[in-house]
Amino acid sequence: MQAAQRILTIFGTRPEAIKLFPLVHALEGDSRFASRVCVTGQHRGMLDQVLAISGVVPDHDLAVMQPDQTLDALTARLLVGIGKVLDEERPDWVVVQGDTATAMAGALAAYYRKIPVCHVEAGLRSGNIHHPWPEEINRRIIGPIAALHCAPTETAARALRAETIDPATVHVTGNTVIDALFWITDRIAREPALAGGLAELERRFAGKRIIGVTSHRRENFGQGMQSIADAIRRIAVRPDIALIYPVHLNPNVRSVMDRELAGLDNVALIEPLDYPHFAHLIGMSHLMLTDSGGVQEEAPALGKPVLVMRETTERPEGVEAGTARLVGTDADAIVAETFRLLDDDAAYAAMARAHNPFGDGKSAARIAELLAR
Ligand code: UD1
Ligand code: UDP
């Protein structure tokens, strides 16, 4: 019998944890693999929320997060910390996801040791190195390093082939975020109390249409966040809506939102929600206003229009399918597009269509098969 392959899955932030727990579950349940998990702790509270609900128990926790961390110091801590874990574990494969500092440093540390890298959610490109910043460069660094590219869509696979990545190493697997979303909605169906914590807000805002909001992008710090806050204040003037905004723990986001939006009747600024509550929030929302990557994938799957507060997107599939629209961070544009969706039933109906351009919920199993080969 062949020895089990030693797979080290490395992640550090909330979205990576959400998109990798389905793969960790798949590897742990398969005797062809010896699964090990290293979390970098690039995020702390928001990462731990996902570990708790998914039941993933890390073998290593580097606890690198520092308040308001800079990209260079964070990257240095990550490279050194991950390197030590790789020397100890000596895995056959390293798995990284997406385009965070953790993913980039994980791939680079593996490359320094000639350990093959599997890149989950490979091939996303905006074509602009400043949007999103620094993620566009992080994922372009991982590209030539990875030996196995798990592209979520054909568009992503095409982008990799255009960069002269060996086509034999590029596979369209779908995005594991849809696996995670199906898993969590199934759990909520069996245990509704898992997402019951929004009941008080549901009572407070009864009869109003809910707009779910998230924002955190580094390229939007300063003027962009101020402009997003201005737009929310202007939208909140309407008596027929309410905004529920779980605020990212990044101090560059919280300071602006607390200053500009605290105390408004129609705005609930709340702590980051755990995954079941956030999935419930998307479900109860009329539309989502976001600069998040993951929310652009989840909202279409749940049939909710998304207005994307970014200048570019590396996820054109939602825009092409009509459920997502790029509005940028200009306050006038955000307000105008939001009001259009609230007041024009035909425009709303055209965007509110459940569909899954990003996956079918079986991506983790496909990636496990590729690793087994
Ligand atoms: C990071 C990723 C970004 C991803 C986002 C998801 C990088 C460079 N950025 O951005 O690609 O879209 O996560 O949310 O990899 N903080 C806490 N507790 C937490 C999380 C963050 O206090 O649980 C605060 C800390 O002060 C920390 C700061 O937020 O220093 C920034 O965290 P960091 O991971 O550097 O950047 P994000 O903006 O969260
Ligand atoms: N999310 C969550 N709680 C929240 C906000 C978001 O669980 O309060 C989830 C969301 O469902 C999605 C992921 O976090 O799966 C997106 O993370 P984020 O927006 O921080 O990062 P990005 O996807 O932009 O990298």
Image: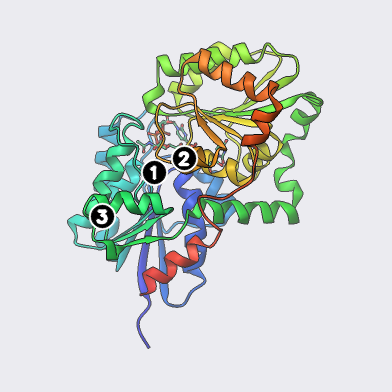
How far across and how far down the image is residue 253, in percent? 47, 23
Image coordinates for residue 121, horizontal then vertical, percent: 40, 51
Q: Amino acid at mark 1?
A: Ala
Query: Are there few (<14), some (14-19), or many (20+) residues within 10 Å of tag 1?
Result: some
Whether label 3 lies within 8 Å of ligand 1 gets the answer: no
Determine if the C-beta at disc 2 is less than 8 A from ligand 1: yes
Looking at this view, name the residue that lies furthest to the bottom: 1
Residue at the image position 39 percent from the left and 49 percent from the top: 155
Say what amino acid the circle numbered 2 marks. Answer: Arg
Give the camera-side residue of 219 and 349.
349
Mark 1 vs mark 3, CA separation in Å = 14 Å
Q: Whole-percent x and y of residue 292?
A: 48, 35
- Quadrant observed for ligand 1 in the rendered image: top left
Which residue has dot 2 on it?
A: 44
How many angstroms separate mark 2 from mark 3 (CA)? 20 Å
* Residue 130 as seen in the image, left or right of residue 57: left
Question: Secondary structure beneath disc 2?
Answer: loop
| Label located before the other in sequence (2 or 3) | 2
Judging by the rendered image, the residue that carries numbered circle 3 is 84
The secondary element bearing badge 3 is classed as helix
Location of mark 1 (residue): 63
In this view, the residue in front, 169 or 342, is: 342
Screen quadrant of the C terminus? bottom left
> Mark 1 touching mark 2, by CB under 8 A?
yes
User: Can you see residue 61?
Assistant: no
**Residue 91 spot, x, y in % from top left:** 30, 66
SS under mark 1: loop
Q: Is residue 204 left or right of residue 108?
A: right
The answer to whether mark 2 and mark 3 are in CB contact below 8 A is no
